[in-house]
Image (tube, rainbow, N blue to C red):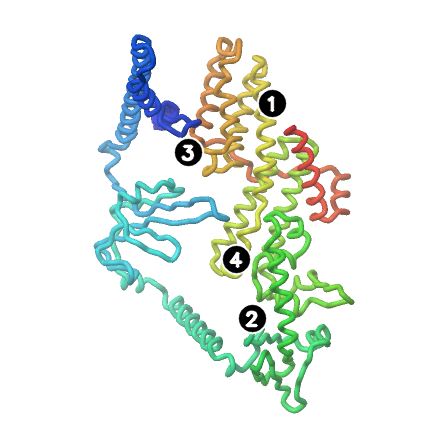
Amino acid sequence: MESCRKEIEQAKFEIDKLTNDPSLSMDRRDILIHALNYFDECEELDKENLETLKEVLNTAKQSIDMRLNELEEIILDQRECIHSVFNREDMKDNPYDLRASFHHDGKSGTGHYWAYIWVEPREQTLLSDIPLEGGWFKFCDAYVTACTETEVYSDPVPPFSIMYATASLPKYTSDQLYSCIPDSLKDFINADNRLLDEEIYSHDNLHNTQGNSSLISTSDDDVGFIESTGSQLESRFADLEISSTDDTNSVGTAVAHTTVEYSEPHQYSFTGHSFNQLKERVNSKIMEVSTYPNDDYRLLKSFETFLARTQNQLLLEHLYLIYSSEEGDEFIVDEEGSRKDDELNDIWNIYDSYLGIGEMITQALSYFVKQDYSRALQCLLDSKRHEATWKTGHLLDMDISHSYSGLSTISFNHIIELYGKECLKILNNAAYKKATHEAYRTRGLEDAIRIAHQAQSVVGPDKMINDSVYISLGELWLSFTEQPGISGSLTNTHVELLNTLVMIYLEGQSGINSTGTRSRSDSPSQVSDNEEEENEEVPLWQKYQTLCTQSQQLLQSLNK
C-alpha cells in the first residue's frame, strides 16, 4: 500500500510539473494554446514556416495531454489497488465507521483546531443545540454547524487524527449515561456549581460582600483593589494614604467617589489616586513589553517582563502592590521574593519551564557560533519540540490560556527556523560532497536522509510546499545522478537510499509527512567543566543576548 501511495504522489508531482509554469503561474497547455491562436492571427510570417511551427506546438500539446491521461490512469489504478487491499471478506467481520476527524492548521501561534464529529441519529441527543436527526457537525471554537460527509472528506487541511467506532457498540441515551455517574461525583459537581453561583453573586454584589478578598481587579475606575496582607502592605506602601478606625478596624476604599466598607481586621484601603498610579504603571508596562520581539532577551531576564507579556493585568498589579519598592527614582521589584506567593505560583512554574527552553536555545546558538552545525541543529530541534510541548500543554488548558493570553506570542521559532535552515544547508552540502565520492557514498546518502527528516521538522508540514530552502535541499539531490560518473557507479544500496531520499522531499512538497527518524526525545549536550563554570558566572539572558549577536554576525559572513 505504501508503494501505491508513492506512485500516486509521483504521478501528482509529474502532473504539476507538466501543467504548471512557475514563472508565469499558468498551465503549460494554455500557453501553447495562446501561442497557436497568436500564430493563427499572424499574417506577416511565412505560411510554410508557420505551419511547421504550429505542428511542433500541437505535437507538444498532444504529448502533454497523452502523458497527463496516463498519469491520471496511474492515480486511478493505484487508488483502486489501495481500496482492494481492504475490500476483502476477511476484513469485513468487524465493521468500523468513521466518527470523528480532527484538524489543525499550525499557523496562528500554536495553531487553530477544529473537528468534524458524527452525532448518532438513533441516539437521544446529548446536547440540546444539536438536532435529533443527527449526522455530521463541524466544531470550530464556539460554533457548531451541520455539514455533509462530502465537506468532511473535502476539507483542504488533512486531519492529524481520525477516530473510528466499531459498529457493534451499543447506543445509549443521555439518561442511561447519567445513571452511570457515581453519586459522589454528582454531589461534587453540584457543590462546585453552587460555589460558582456564590462567586458570581459576590462579584455582582461587590458592595455588600463581607469577608476576606484576596485580589480584586482595578481594570475599571470604579472598582477597588483590596489586598489582605496586614502589616506587610503597611510597611511596603507607607506612602499611600491609609485610613482605619480604632474601634472596629473597618476601612473604606475610595476610587473616584465609590467607597467599599469591610469589617475584617487588618485590611487597608488606598486612595483612588494611588491606585490610578498603580494602574497606569501596569498598563504602561504591558504596552511597552508588547512591542518586544517574540524571542527578546528581556523575557529571559525578568519575571516581571514575562508576566507583563502574558497580559495578566491582575497579577501584575499584585506583583507591584506586594513586592515593589521605590528607591529614589528607581522602581524595584523583588522577583525572588514573589516566588513563594500562592497567587503567582502557576505563572512562576510556566516561567521556569520557559527558562529551560531558553537554556536549550542558548546552547544551540553556542554550537552554531563554534560552527558545530550538527549539534546546533539537533539542539534547535529539541528546543522546538520542547517549546511545542510547553505551549500546547498550557494553551490547551482553558483557564491558563484565558488568564495568560499573551503566552501565544512568546516563541523562539524565528531563531529555530533562521539558524536551523542555515545548518541544514551546510550539512546537506557536506553530505552531497561526501556522496560524490564512491567510497563515502553510502554514508553521505544516509546523512542526507537524516537531514531531510530534520528539514521537515524545522520547516514544518504547512510550509514545506513553498519554502525555498526546503525546495533547494531536495533539488540538489534530484540532479545527483546527472553528475559525471555517478549514474554508472551506483550500487543497488545506493539506488535504494537515493530513491528514499528523493521521495522524502517529494512527499514533503506534496503536503505529506514522510516517516523516518525524527529528533531524539532528548539529546543532552556535552559541556566541558570549564564551560560549565563560565556558564554559571554569566546570567542566561546575557549569554543569550551575546550569542544572538555573534550568531547573526556569523550568518551574515556565511551568506556573503
Residue type of the residue flagged with mark 3: Ile
Residue type of the residue flagged with mark 1: Ala
| Tag nearer the camera, 3 or 2 | 2
User: What residue is pinned by disc 3?
Assistant: 512
CA–CA distance between discs 4 and 1? 43 Å
CA–CA distance between discs 4 and 3? 32 Å
**At x 27% / y 23%, what residue is drawn?**
73
- Decide if residue 497 is in sight here: no
- Residue placed most toward the observer, 184 or 119: 119
Q: Which label belongs to residue 74?
A: none
User: What residue is pinned by disc 4?
Assistant: 405
**CB contact under 8 Å: marks 4 and 3:** no
Left or right, 338 with reference to 31:
right
Bin the neighbour count of mark 3 within 10 Å (Cα to Cα): few under 14, some 14-19, many 20 and up.
Answer: some
Question: First in sequence: mark 4 or mark 3?
Answer: 4
Question: First in sequence: mark 2 or mark 1?
Answer: 2
Name the spot of residue 191 as percent of width and height, x first: 42, 72
CA–CA distance between discs 2 and 1? 58 Å
- Residue placed most toward the observer, 299 or 39: 39
User: What residue is pinned by disc 2?
Assistant: 217
**CB contact under 8 Å: marks 4 and 1:** no
Q: Which label belongs to residue 430?
A: 1
In the rendered view, tell whether residue 151 sits above or below residue 421.
Answer: below
Question: First in sequence: mark 2 or mark 4?
Answer: 2
CA–CA distance between discs 2 and 4? 17 Å
In the rendered view, tell whether residue 493 sits above or below residue 173.
Answer: above
